[in-house]
Amino acid sequence: MTTRTATKRTASDAQPFDFNLDAVQAEVDLTPWRVNWKGRRWEFAHMEDLDVWGLIEAAEGGDIAATVGVFKAALGEKDWTEFRKIRLPQYKLKALFDAYKQHCGVGEGESEASSDS
């Protein structure tokens, strides 16, 4: 008696895709947002251009952690480290985040992960 083993078939790159994520383009202008703070220019990447994985992890810590996660991702590790060295009162953080959301086209009560539906 001959024993048969199942073989797993894999799709080759020559096969059509159900969805081509490589072809997706941003629907908004991803111009960075520039801020003057303590005599220095800070450049924040556009919210739509931020890597979502760090943002998702930060959001698990609540609203403040999510806000910090957005700024950390937007500034990048080096600038974030420098930015954190400067005392930042809460009222300025709120104004900064509100203005950043406005630049990025995120409305009140809407997060960068919200859908249009």
Image (cartoon, helix red, strand yellow):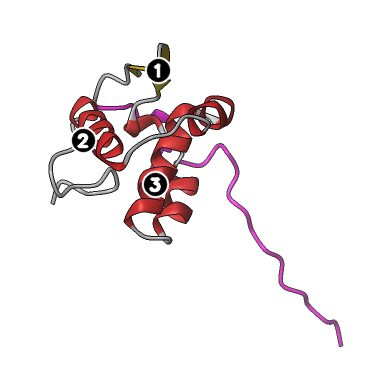
Q: Position of residue 52 (x, y in %)?
A: 43, 44
Q: Label 3: state its secondary structure.
A: loop
| Between 60 and 31, the one nearer to me in the picture | 60
Left or right, residue 6 beside residue 95: right
Question: Who comes first in sequence, dot 2 or dot 1?
Answer: 1
Q: Position of residue 67 (x, y in %)?
A: 35, 45
Disc 1 marks a residue whose amino acid type is Lys
Left or right, residue 9 beside residue 23: right
| Between 78 and 11, the one nearer to me in the picture | 78
Residue located beneath label 3 in the image: 18
Write the start and end of the magenta stretch as one range.
Answer: 1-27
Residue located beneath label 2 in the image: 98
Q: Position of residue 10 (x, y in %)?
A: 62, 54
Asked whether the residues under the numbered discs 3 and 2 touch, taking CB atoms below 8 Å apart as contact, a structural biologist would say no
- Locate residue 104: give its quadrant: top left
- Locate residue 77: give its quadrant: top right
Give the prevailing secondary structure in the magenta stretch: loop
Question: Who comes first in sequence, dot 1 or dot 3?
Answer: 3
Q: Nearer the viewer, mark 1 or mark 3?
A: 1
Q: Mark 1 to mark 3: distance in Å?
A: 50 Å
Residue located beneath label 1 in the image: 38
- Crowding around mark 3 (Cα neighbors within 10 Å: few <14, some 14 to 19, many 20+) is few
Disc 2 marks a residue whose amino acid type is Asp
Image point (44%, 44%), residue name: 69
Image point (42%, 60%), residue name: 61
